[in-house]
Amino acid sequence: MYKIILPNFEGPLDLLIYFIKRYEINIYDIPIAKITNEFLNYIRLMQILDIEISSEFILMASTLMEIKAKMLLPNKNEQNFKEDEDPRKELVDKLIEYQVIKELSNELKLNFIKNQNLFFRGLFESEITELSKQLKTFKPLGLVDLANAFYALFVQHKPEDKGQIIPKETLSIQEEINRIQNILKRKKYIVFPKLIQSKEKRYVIITFLALLELVKSKKAYLYQCDFDTEILVFSSDFIAKN
Amino acid sequence: MMFFYLDYEVQKRIVESLIFASEEPISIVNLTEILTSKIDFSSMNLQSNFQQSPPTNEIDFEKYFKKLIEDINQELRYTLRPYQIIFVAGGYTFATTEEYGKIISLLPSFRYKKRLSRAMLEVLTIIAYNQPITRPEIENIRGTNSAEVINSLLEKNLIKVVGRKNVPGKPHLFATTNDFLKLFGLGSLEELPKYNEIRTLVEERDKQEKIELKIDFNREDLES
Amino acid sequence: MMFFYLDYEVQKRIVESLIFASEEPISIVNLTEILTSKIDFSSMNLQSNFQQSPPTNEIDFEKYFKKLIEDINQELRYTLRPYQIIFVAGGYTFATTEEYGKIISLLPSFRYKKRLSRAMLEVLTIIAYNQPITRPEIENIRGTNSAEVINSLLEKNLIKVVGRKNVPGKPHLFATTNDFLKLFGLGSLEELPKYNEIRTLVEERDKQEKIELKIDFNREDLES
């Protein structure tokens, strides 16, 4: 087995900009046939290498082919398009805007690097007291409580079930466990509903199963205040330390 | 007894402790508001000789507090503290000095704390310049699915939901947070690199590439 | 070059900045782990004369770091800083000194200044005027789920549970606390702006100019 490393593109626009740079193409006059071929070749390469192709690439391929077809249609008066009826215009605008964003994010990255050695105060008194207060007044919960809370949340929030478009990336329970554990490494605790906010139905279920797994294997602990308030998820490390 | 009648040394300590204890950068306006409110500092058992001081309405608060904070910083430098008061995200807050920040960033448990992927930077940029903005709008600019990236930015508290857009589906509207400004060392959003300047630059460059292309064509002509 | 070969002064600064930047109280075990890992401090361009030091396996880390932190604290005291390193929740962290902590807590609206969201203010207002009140009743007035907001208000000790209402489900009854009064600078609940006054004010907001005019007239009446 060997690995092939393809340049990491942030989507089809990023790939198109790569072609434009590489062939030093004038962005205002893109040779659409050539670019479409390059683009399709890249997709074929991905297929051969068995790399999952996200729907955006397929969509872009069809957009390119559509533009190509429009360009081939004989124009009534002139062979050249006026600027605002050029079928490439929308794509060109997008490419320019995206390039501007890329440049801006490079500029911001410089700020980021310059500031990498700046550390702010990590912990405040109010957080300390809040934390110790919580651990005193909050009571530990079991799996049944989790199931109840989950059910309540499910009824309350009615997560959207987007039937039509199914995102290509699939989320495994293990990935979700990793995600939760990563948050717990940084944040000491998570408010339970926050884990699930703005997610689709099947994600909610995966989150629930992941949480079940973590609680069962004692990698996370659940606490709740005496009141009918939110459940908090703590990492086992944190509980051990306190 | 008013704040401004306290010993200057005690005034410095109070401001220093205020900035130290505040979780968010504290602005001059905020400082002024807090310290000119009717509190009787003489009841606080401070070791301070109260001094004659100009009445508040004659004080230029901004100048006064800036000087005071600069004086605190000088003390911190003289006494070799590894942190300083800096201005960021619209206010004053404590942060490590460059020298010791560098050391900390090399220590294993701090090294990976500050990492942003290219995708995260891109989405942050889009939100910073177009806020408030919805996920579909972000994805339209990037040309790619950004749900995961947005989630991790929310988790890192670099962006927040500020409402919903009144269009079908009522999508969330996202905006950047103070933590974003802190991470990039910006006093306010106005300190972001200028959009129009960069846009002109990109457009100019694209035109330049056109010229190069022509030259290339010519060369090909010559060669063939 | 190992940590323990650095100048003692530089060692103190490194530990101080570590405790400063850490997001959790940092234990001696933690400190030891971080500072005995293989980092080459000599590359860090520190203004330090490297000294001969006992090899690490002879150092009693606990004793060493405790002494070091005590020495930092002494410096902080000598230089009159309004904060100290304290031991809490299994580790070391910074906190304001008792003296200045007290002053800060007396300053109005400091702690909550930036941390009360609009939703929190809304719920606080509803509770203040309708106490004791249950969550469903609050949600009925606001027309939106308020569990999380109520939770944060409880955490901030701005509201408290005063009992349960004798209706199906026995929901908790909430009321405002003394901290709420302090935060808004009220002597008692009676000092809250009168509900009816506010209502009139809101209803007549459009005619605001007229109201002001009336008041002016009245004053003139008095003066003349």
Image (cartoon, coloured by chain):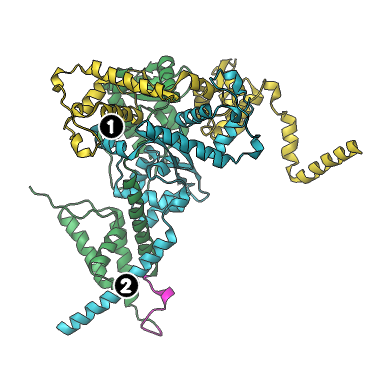
Chain colours: A green, B cyan, C yellow
Question: In what quadrant of the picture does the N terminus of chain B appear?
Answer: top right
Looking at the rendered image, the disc whose residue lies closer to the viewer, 2 or 1, is 2
Relative to B119, A5 lies left or right? left
Q: Residues within 10 Å of mark 1 (few under 14, many from 20)?
A: some
Measured along the vertical axis of the image, is residue B182 above or below residue B38? below
| Cα–Cα gap, marks 2 and 1 | 50 Å
Q: Nearer the viewer, residue A166 or C205?
A: C205
Q: Disc number at residue B20?
A: none
Q: Residues within 10 Å of mark 2 (few under 14, many from 20)?
A: few
Which residue is situated farthest in the left direction here?
A1
Horizontal placement of B215 versus C148: left or right?
A: left
Residue extending furthest right? C224
Which span of residues is magenta-colored? A76-88
Q: Label 1 is placed on what type of residue?
A: Ile
User: Where A82 sits versus B12, above or below?
Assistant: below
Is residue B145 visible from the viewing direction of this image?
A: no
Q: Which residue is mark 1?
A: A177
Q: Up-down: is B196 above or below C102?
A: below
As helix, strand or loop, the secondary structure at mark 2 comes to helix
Q: Residue at x 36, y 25 (%)?
A: A233
State the residue in front, B164 or C218: C218
Q: Chain of mark 2?
A: B
Using the image, name the chain to which the residue with label 1 belongs: A
The residue labelled by disc 2 is B208
